[in-house]
Image: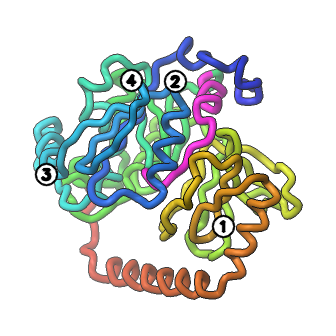
Amino acid sequence: MSENLPPAQRKNMLAGQKRVAVVLPYFGQLPTTWPLTLASMEQNSEIDWLIFTDQEVKSSAANIRVSMTTLEDTRDRFSKSLELAVALETPYKLCDFKPAYGELYLDELAPYDYWGYCDADVVFGDVQAHVVAALETADFKIFRRGHLSLIPNNEAGRSSFRLGVVGADDYRAVFSDPNSRAFDEVGGMYQRLKAHGLDVYEDEALFDIGADKFRLKANSALSGERFYVLEGGQLSALDSNGRWVRSGRYIHLQKRAYRRLPPGWDSAPVLGFSPDGVVACRSVKDACDAICARESNWSARIAWQRRYINRRFRGLKSRLTAPSPKHNL
């Protein structure tokens, strides 16, 4: 597979096949890990990252395109494009609109063969190598999760969010509902694409960190998987002895309250991902040791438990008070 080729042999392979752009609208305070996320985007230079935001994002990389805007202007843009009064009162609701970005950002995406969307609480590894591998076999959508997905920039791809499924709300009901409906994943596109026989390429080469445990562990973790590190632009899962287990295209730090990046993070040979922050180290062994030290820190563990309990309580309260969705049969 192409992702196993040496970097020198992979250079420009993606550019030679397809032009790819990933759209990220983001409003409000950026995650503490954002500088590392941006650096990982810059490293994947054969993918263009189109960022729409009200925050200051500085980058001199040619593949980073920043457009200053507001959530209000974005809501107006979406409403006009869809000819629908959309409910976009909070930034989190943007998740439901991700499958429609092909239409909503039609002009900006015109030069590309594939368009996609991602989250801001991720750090990317060698994404473009994984995309090259996917292009060898994918028939339609590449990757299935809202953290990072790519869709063909053709009429079928751009309009796939309009597909109907018996017993489920259509996109108009979802987009006009102020509540989050997970339309980019289980609550929407999963069942729509499956019902209409549209292929989704997925290889599980990602580290989607579970949110219900203090120690980091990917939801799709293999046996023996223990640590997650970034070295030379490559994301790897390691076992308890620091030995390589598998590679990942990104790590998703969902619902993690990470500390600010440590001094020297941008020049450290190895970055490790601990339960509450990134550690900058000289070697893989040092990274594993530093992660273990944070895991043994009781203050960090107690702080995480408090946030976890509060988040679960807020989630339960939201579910109990939310109105029942209406279905268009």
Q: What stretch of residues is rendered in magenta?
A: 120-135
Q: Which mark is residue 160?
A: none
What whole-number distance in Å separates the C-alpha atoms at marks 4 and 2? 17 Å
Q: Is residue 293 magenta?
A: no
Amino acid type, label 1: Leu
Amino acid type, label 2: Glu
Among numbered discs 4 and 1, the one appearing first in the sequence? 4
**Residue 160 place in picture, x, y as percent:** 36, 34
Q: Is residue 133 magenta?
A: yes
| Circle 4 residue | 153
| Circle 2 residue | 46
Among numbered discs 4 and 3, the one appearing first in the sequence? 3
What whole-number distance in Å separates the C-alpha atoms at marks 3 and 2? 31 Å
Among numbered discs 3 and 1, the one appearing first in the sequence? 3
Nearer to the camera, 310 or 55: 55
Residue 80, visible in the rendered structure = yes
Q: How many marks?
A: 4
Among numbered discs 2 and 1, the one appearing first in the sequence? 2
The secondary structure type at the circle numbered 4 is loop
The residue positioned 56% from the left and 44% from the top of the image is: 124
What whole-number distance in Å separates the C-alpha atoms at marks 4 and 3? 26 Å
| Circle 1 residue | 216
Q: Quadrant of the N terminus?
A: top right
